[in-house]
Image (cartoon, grey):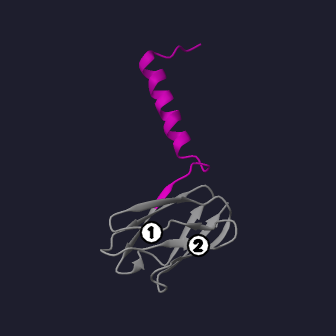
Amino acid sequence: MRTLTHGTAALLLALAALAGSAAPGHAETVVVDQVGKKFSTPELTIRKGDTVTFANKDPITHNVYSQSPGNAFDVKTQKPGESSDVTFSTPGDVDVQCAIHPGMKLRIHVGN
């Protein structure tokens, strides 16, 4: 029978913790900037439970929202420099817009 030293046991525990943080069920946060009256990407794929941070990098106010079933949200008025987190809990496509600037559009694909 082998006995683990304190250092080896600590290393194994640290590796197990790191492996757990990379597990498929681990939720992530993705940042989408708003710059030049546009979202930084027109399309995004995330997993169920992930959070999207909408960061207003414009010198003007935005109002990001979606009316997509299962993932409807409205961050309300978002002043320059502010950011808002939205967690997506239902798989499906989410159409995101700005209520102030109708040309701002983003589609988020939420997977399982």
Work out whether mark 1 precedes mark 2 in sequence or the reverse, and give the earlier one.
2
* Residue 85 place in picture, x, y as percent: 49, 58
Q: Secondary structure at mark 1?
A: loop
The numbered disc on residue 28 is none
Q: Residue at x 40, y 65 (%)?
A: 55
Q: Quadrant of the C terminus?
A: bottom right
* Residue 103 place in picture, x, y as percent: 47, 86
Outermost left residue: 59
Q: Marks 1/2: CA distance?
A: 14 Å
Q: Residue at x 37, y 62 (%)?
A: 82
The numbered disc on residue 77 is 1
Image: 100 above or below 21: below
Q: Check if residue 82 falls in the magenta segment.
A: no
Q: Quadrant of the N terminus?
A: top right
Is residue 66 toward the left or the right of residue 112 in the image?
left
- The foreground one among 111 and 101 is 101
Q: Check if residue 7 falls in the magenta segment.
A: yes
Image: 42 above or below 32: below
Closer mark to the observer between disc 1 and disc 2: 1
Segment colored magenta: 1-30
Q: Which residue is mark 2?
A: 66
Circle 2: residue type: Ser
